[in-house]
Every structure is written in structure tokens, then in C-alpha cells.
């Protein structure tokens, strides 16, 4: 039997979140469409950073957020991603390791700057997101620390990784390595537009390698281009374990064809829902690793998701062990 050093190895984009309050007039001066989610180049990224004052800076990225949540429960995990050789890369690495997630950048000579998402929040709480992809797009086979996969029980893959061809090859390699070492493969579909871009490849990965799937209602319906019930029927034919989040309606979780609807926990006036899916996955995975029933895995995911949306940001403000009682 292999030695298990980590329970989960998370693989995703290494992104630093930079959050700043800004006026509508400032947005117009920067010529940024309000409420937009846009990709920006290095020049515009630097211009925005020079413009904003006293931003909140924290390491981010979907899989990294889930890793931090999993660690906050007391889980033992690692992260594989690509940062640049700059101050933001140093911040990402320190922040993740200080959160209890083992991360060590394998390539230290990356010329690109660390990826960043600059989130500008206007007084009405509207968020305008400006993402500079930077070093993340250089993720490739050379970035993989094989030992982290070999000595884990589960690898968790962020669907956004499929947006880069070299990263895609690296993901397939990770999946093959996981299967060779009796390691389960979990996939998050990440975003319905991401599913539209890579529908055939996601289906192929699911059919060949994936044991555990995370998606929301729009993502699973996009994958199968069908109704929710028909999509659930199809995914259960290919996947052993899955969780489909339904927003305010709760979540549907399943294992070995047995399906459960887990009601949501009501929250009045949610502040920021962007991290809900990431933190839900951390709770579900922690429950799964610790042999909770599939319904209790869903309940734990719902609990922490309902808490994270009460404040801005995708990282827990308190130890998630609080939710284990």
C-alpha cells in the first residue's frame, strides 16, 4: 500500500486577487465596463494597479480557494500551479503555505508576471473583474510535481486549466499518473462558458478518468445540452460521486446512482456569491475523505457556502472546523 502524504492535491490557476473600492467616475476614467468580466493585458493591468488605492490583496484562483477551505477544516493538501518570479508570486506562495496548503513552484525562471484578478467594487457592490492571465498560461508538464499526485488520495482539477493547450496535456498526464497510483480524480467544471469551449474534451476526460464531479446547474446542463434531470441521468452513468449546486435551491449530491436533494441554508441579502462553489467543494471533499454519508457531505458544503456569501471574498474568515460540530 502506498504512503499517503496528502489527502487531496489541487491543480489550478495560481491567481492573486486584488480587490479595491472604486467610484463609478473612476471606472469611466479607466474605460472599464461596469459589471464586466474581462481579460486584460499587462499594460492595462499595470495601469489599473497604479490607479487604485489601498487594495486588499490575497492569493486566489478557484482550485486554490477550495484547497484553503479544505485545509481550514483540518484537511491535509497540496497545490500545483504556476506563478511568476515577482512580488505577487511570492505573496501567493506565502499566503497558500500559511493557510496550511503545501505549495512549491517547480519552475522559478518564468518570465511572465503572476496572474492576477483585479476586482473593482463600486458603492452599489457591483464587481468589475479584470483578469491578467500572466504566468498561469505557461502551465505545462514541467510544472508537475509528480510526488504530490502519487502520494495523494484524490487529485482535484480546475476546469479553467483547459483554456491552455499545454495545460490540457499536463492535466491528461496527471490523470493517467493518478490512475496508475490508485488515486481518485475530481473535476470542477468551473464555468458554463468554459464548458461551452471544451464540451467534447470534458466529456472525454469524464469518460476516461473522472471519479468525482463538481458543477452547478448551468454547467451540467451545458455539458449535456439538456435539462437538469436528463443531465443528471447521463452524468450518473459515468461518474461514481457528484455534487451539483443549485444556488438558493441547495444542491443535488449522488453516489453510486443514489441521489439526494440537500436543502440550502437561507441567507438574507448575500454580499458576494463568487466563492460559494469553491468553498462548497471544500466541505464536500472533507466529508468524503472522512467517510461522511453523501448527504452529509452535501450538508457540510451547503453550510460553508451559505457562510462565505455573507462577506466579500472567496476565503474563509474563520476556521471551518467551527462547522464540524
Image: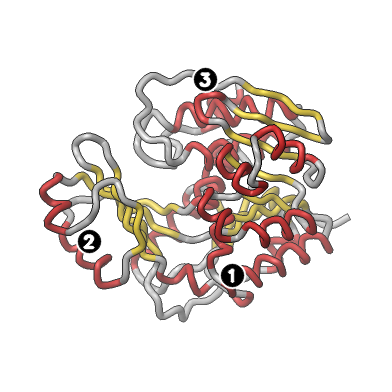
Q: Position of residue 41 (x, y in %)?
A: 32, 70
Disc 3 target residue? 265
- The answer to whether 133 is drawn above or below residue 212 in the figure is below
| Residue placed furthest toward the right | 1
Examine the rendered structure and indicate whether residue 42 appears above or below residue 294.
below
| Label 1: which secondary element | helix
Residue under pointer 1 = 167
Report x, y in % for residue 3: 80, 56
**Mark 2 or mark 1, which has the lower sequence index?**
2
Q: CA distance from mark 2 to mark 1?
A: 28 Å
**Where the C terminus falls, by quadrant?**
top right
The 10 Å Cα crowd at callout 2, few under 14, some 14 to 19, many 20 or more, is some
Quadrant where the image shows the N terminus: bottom right
Instruction: Tell which tag, 2 or 1, sits nearer the viewer.
Output: 1
Counting from the top left corner in percent of width and height, residue 72 is at 54, 39
Of 89 and 256, which appears nearest the observer?
256
Q: Earlier in the sequence, mark 3 or mark 2?
A: 2
Q: Which residue extends farthest front? A: 226
Q: Helix, strand or loop at disc 2?
A: helix
> Which residue is depicted at the point 46% across and 27% down?
307
Q: Are marks 2 and 1 in contact (CB under 8 Å)?
A: no
Q: Which label sits on residue 49? A: 2
Q: CA distance from mark 3 to mark 2?
A: 37 Å
Q: Is residue 56 visible?
A: no
Q: How is the image coloured?
A: secondary structure
User: Which residue is rendered at x = 45% and y = 37% of the image?
Assistant: 316
**Residue found at x 38% / y 19%:** 268
Amino acid at each position: 500500500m502506498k504512503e499517503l502524504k496528502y489527502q487531496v492535491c489541487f491543480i489550478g490557476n495560481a491567481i492573486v486577487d486584488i480587490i479595491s473600492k472604486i467610484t463609478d467616475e473612476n471606472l469611466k476614467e479607466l474605460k472599464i465596463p461596469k459589471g464586466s468580466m474581462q481579460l486584460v493585458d499587462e499594460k492595462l493591468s499595470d495601469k489599473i494597479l497604479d490607479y487604485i488605492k489601498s487594495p486588499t490583496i490575497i492569493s486566489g484562483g478557484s482550485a486554490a480557494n477550495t484547497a484553503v477551505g479544505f485545509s481550514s477544516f483540518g484537511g491535509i493538501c497540496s497545490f500545483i500551479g504556476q506563478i511568476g518570479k515577482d512580488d505577487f508570486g511570492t505573496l501567493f506562495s506565502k499566503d497558500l503555505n500559511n493557510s496550511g496548503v503545501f505549495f512549491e513552484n517547480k519552475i522559478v525562471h518564468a518570465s511572465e508576471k503572476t496572474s492576477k484578478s483585479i476586482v473593482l467594487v463600486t458603492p452599489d457592490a457591483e464587481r468589475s473583474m479584470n483578469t491578467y492571465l500572466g504566468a498561469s498560461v505557461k502551465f505545462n508538464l514541467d510544472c508537475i510535481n509528480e510526488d504530490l499526485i502519487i502520494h495523494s488520495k484524490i487529485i482535484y482539477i480546475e476546469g479553467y486549466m483547459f483554456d491552455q493547450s499545454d495545460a490540457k496535456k499536463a492535466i491528461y498526464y496527471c490523470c493517467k499518473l493518478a490512475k496508475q497510483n490508485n488515486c481518485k480524480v475530481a473535476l470542477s467544471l468551473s464555468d458554463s462558458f468554459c464548458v461551452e469551449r471544451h464540451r467534447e474534451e470534458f466529456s472525454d476526460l469524464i469518460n476516461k478518468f473522472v471519479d468525482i464531479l463538481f458543477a452547478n446547474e448551468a454547467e451540467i446542463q451545458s455539458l449535456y445540452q439538456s435539462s437538469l434531470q436528463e443531465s443528471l441521468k447521463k452524468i450518473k452513468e459515468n461518474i461514481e460521486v457528484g455534487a451539483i449546486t443549485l444556488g438558493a435551491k441547495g444542491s443535488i449530491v449522488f453516489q453510486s446512482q443514489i441521489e439526494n436533494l440537500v436543502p440550502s441554508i437561507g441567507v438574507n441579502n448575500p454580499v458576494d456569491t463568487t466563492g460559494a462553489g469553491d468553498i462548497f467543494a471544500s466541505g464536500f471533499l472533507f466529508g468524503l475523505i472522512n467517510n461522511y454519508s453523501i448527504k452529509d457531505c452535501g450538508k457540510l458544503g451547503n453550510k460553508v457556502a451559505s457562510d462565505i456569501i455573507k462577506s466579500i471574498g472567496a476565503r474563509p474568515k474563520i476556521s471551518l472546523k467551527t462547522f464540524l460540530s
